Image: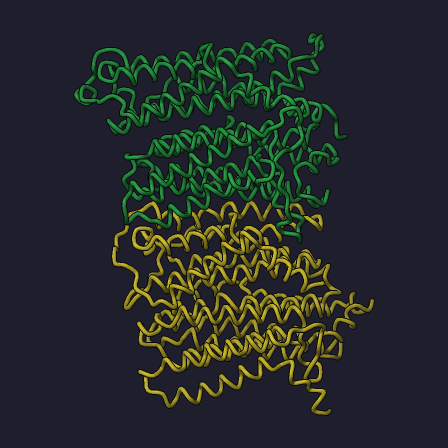
Chain colours: A green, B yellow
Amino acid sequence: MFADLPLLSLIVWLPIFGGVAVLLSGDKGDANGVRVLSLVISIATFILSLGLYAGFDSSTSAMQFVEKTPWIPGFGINYHFGVDGFSMPLIILTTFTTILVVLAGWEVIKKKPAQYLAAFLIMEGLMIAVFAALDAIFFYVFWEAMLVPMFILIGVWGGERRVYATIKFFIYTFIGSVFMLVALIYMYYKGGSFAILDMHAMPLTLNEQTFIFFAFLAAFAVKVPMWPVHTWLPDAHVEAPTGGSVILAAIMLKIGGYGFIRFSMPITPDAAHSFDWLIIFMSLVAVVYIGFVALVQKDMKKLVAYSSIAHMGFVTLGLFVVFQIWENPANVSGGGAALAVEGAMIQMISHGFISGAMFLMIGVLYDRMHTREINAYGGVVHTMPIFAAFAVFFSMANAGLPGTSGFVGEFMVIIASFQANFWYAFLGALTLILGAAYTLWMVKRVFYGEIANEGVRALKDLNARELTIMTTLAIAVLILGLWPAPVVDVMHASVENFLQHIAVSKL
Amino acid sequence: MTFESLNIAIALPEVFLLTMACLILVVDVYLPQEKRNLTYVLTQFSLIITLALLLSNPAETRVLAFNDLFVQDAMADALKLFIIIISFGVFVYSREYLQARNIFKGEFYVLGLFSIVGMMLMVSANNLLMLYLGLELLSLCLYALVAFNRDNGNASEAAMKYFVLGAIASGMLLYGMSILYGLSGSLNLSEIAQAVTNAEGAQNIGMIFALVFIVVALAFKLGAVPFHMWMPDVYQGSPTAVTALIATAPKLAGFAMIMRLLVEALGGLQADWQQMIIVLSVLSLAVGNIIAIAQTNLKRMLAYSTISHVGFILLGILAGTSEGYSSAMFYTISYALMSLGGFGVIMLMARQGFEADNISDLTGLNQRSPWFAFIMMILMLSMAGVPPTVGFWAKLAVLTAVVDVDLVWMAIIAVFFSIIGIFYYLRIIKVMYFDDAVDTRPLECGRDMQIALSTNGLAILALGLYPAALMTLCVSVFN
């Protein structure tokens, strides 16, 4: 039933045009009008994106829902959309998260709500397009355009040091991506096509691959973000409004991980192979060192921001450990590679839910107390029991408690890493301890103990809107934790195809 | 020599515009100040008719006229089209600005029209003399216009500087041309091209000597580093209306001049001028982008930004392929449109006794006028080369052309400096959106200006979403 509709175009353009409509309706009239309009648009987009899931054929790794028309014939650039098992779940994650973000800013944003909501809707469309684009330049256009609404969001609705944070965010990401652009142009010059799938098949020498690999690395490592180019993230998170932090953590970071899957590894498999030690090293530093950094944070948002970096380390670890799994002579069965990649994907989706929930939680507190300092809290459980229950649940998920989605991805990656090298698994597994330490210590200081001050004493528990958001996320985290099979199934064929592709040397 | 060989019909737009400029000059003398609007209306009317004449007779092939002095080809048509459209925009934007400053005078329009005629002649020149005369007609009008607000000290200083440096550049050009004439025995561009391509010509050290002078003069006129010194002062000192005139359409004429001189006449020396232009381009990119960061004056900042854009345009030209030329042309047209919008916003914000030419004057524009803040944001993003604006495609086209001739390192230098460049464009967005307005007076301006500026901004966005049409035009010109 969905086969005839240009479903991907609809999902991309509905929120963008909806955002423009919200923008045009302006901030002069009734703010509730634009809120409801934005909510309707985001829900409609979500429902449409479920059509992708319903119509998805999980038995094939080929691109589905493909739309292709010439856009700029002079350069052979096409308007080219399509999804596979990697991009489809991420698109649904995007549409899902946007609804929560629209809800989260409901009464909180008083300054120009129409512009605020419009920025989110437009950004939603652009991010979906990034996941769905199959033409490299088409991808790049959305990849860069996406920065603009986020730049504005942090800059206008952010905290005290918002200007510093947002300019840092923009310039960091921009630096990374222009080198990717040069690499894309180079491949066009060599291969005569901007289609991503043509680039996958293109023969490249090791020198070329190395150059292209590092150009991509500059773009994606900043986005993920990987140590040592992660420093923009804590700043951006701390200064961003709650909704901005949620989108940043839940979706934008995933675009970096997605980039490795869609570009770096298939286009330059040999360079990825020869530099896998570098990525694994950077990932493990992120997991261990950044875990310790998170431990000493005084600001809750900063703590969660650092924990995001540590968790995203698992994504890059899972992706790049596959080469060593294949090479390990002790690994008789040769299995584990698919587990690693699927683990990385699950980790991305799960982190989308959990980090979103963590930032929304901090937002709930911040809206009431206007501070994110851990020291300013204590004994919140006495005044906000329901909220505290959710907080403990999400914190457990963040620490990787079995039964929650946080456990599944990390566990899969750790198991797979064992097939490569015991020490990778050992260091990776440290996150379970570190994660528990920093998250639960924060929970202890914020929620338990005596009521710290009058501010905390006056706190009111969750209202219906916040309760809805929290419950939805809690359900999502539980489902993915207890029964990840539906998500794994849709990506399985794509993962197999991906592994077969990168196993073949281009030399 | 018969009258037919003059082939006047193909120069009809120029002839008409020149006639109208003379007519307006006479009519304007008899107009009282309160009827000055008639001059404005007549000026715009002549531009529209010129445009219609231009469109009614497109060049199917290369046609020569006036005994080979004048050439009409696809490139000339396309460039003239944009020169006229952009000049029309400048006149729309500047009307209220001039009125508020009591310099709403006929001279602005008459000199403006003459300068447009000059540009059109440069674009269509097929002879060194023709090229030089067009250039001088343009430059002399602009010198006068810079000093147009004669009681303003800054403007007079800028005009003096512009005139002296411009005259030196013209001298350089003439010197180079005279050597060229001496060696080739002809002023005709096609004949010079032949003289250059024969083996003796290409190795002649005299040719290279002439080339150096010509490249220097071109660099002066375009404002490429290290011959850029006049630009910031002239941009800042001139009345904004005149800055807009200097910063936009003449760059198109300058591009045409490079194409006619370096590519058509001296194409045989490409290996030599490529080296020189690489140096000019890298320096322009570096100096333009880095020094722009330090500016507090918006017009001055845009001057440095122009210098960096010139670096990009030269990058396309030095590729030396038809893709390179078309990408440079695409870049020049996009740049002219963005620049027009940028100065339009400055004129929009200006009012009586207030120039609005400091970056801080844009503070909180989003609170005063969300729509024009949005337009300005598009313009800045486009200058920075962020998609989905036309500026991105312009940079992409140039970079592709450069990578195509195996100059990947030039592409990397160019993107490196664009990263530096993005900072000062972001700063404009920052003051417009993130800071609170100090001056909360609403913007006052006429409907015509609002419509024109909105169209200008949206065109940048629309060309960014669908660049194929303009790209195809630019590519077809060089096939």
- The image position of residue B19, as x and y in percent, is 53, 86
Q: Is residue A333 above or below residue B218?
A: above
Q: Which quadrant does the C terminus of chain A fall into?
A: top right
Give coordinates of residue B69: x percent, y percent. Answer: 68, 81
What residue sits 36% from the left and 21% below the top? Answer: A471
Residue at 40% across / 12% down in the picture?
A437
Residue A25 against residue A269 in the figure, above or below = below
Residues A259 and A480: in front is A480
Quadrant of the rendered structure where residue B328 is?
bottom right
Q: How far across and down, in percent of the image, does residue B300 sit?
A: 42, 59
From the viewer's perspective, is residue A411 above or below residue B206?
above
Is residue A299 rendered to the left or right of residue A211?
A: left
Locate the N terminus of chain A by quadrant.
top right
Return the residue nearer the eye: A88 or A397.
A88
| Residue furthest front as drawn | A1
Q: x, y percentage for residue A452?
A: 21, 16
Q: Is residue A448 visible?
A: yes
Q: Is residue A506 left or right of residue A368?
A: right
Q: Nearer the viewer, residue B84 or B49?
A: B49
Residue B281: which quarter of the image? bottom right
- Total of numbered circles in the picture? 0
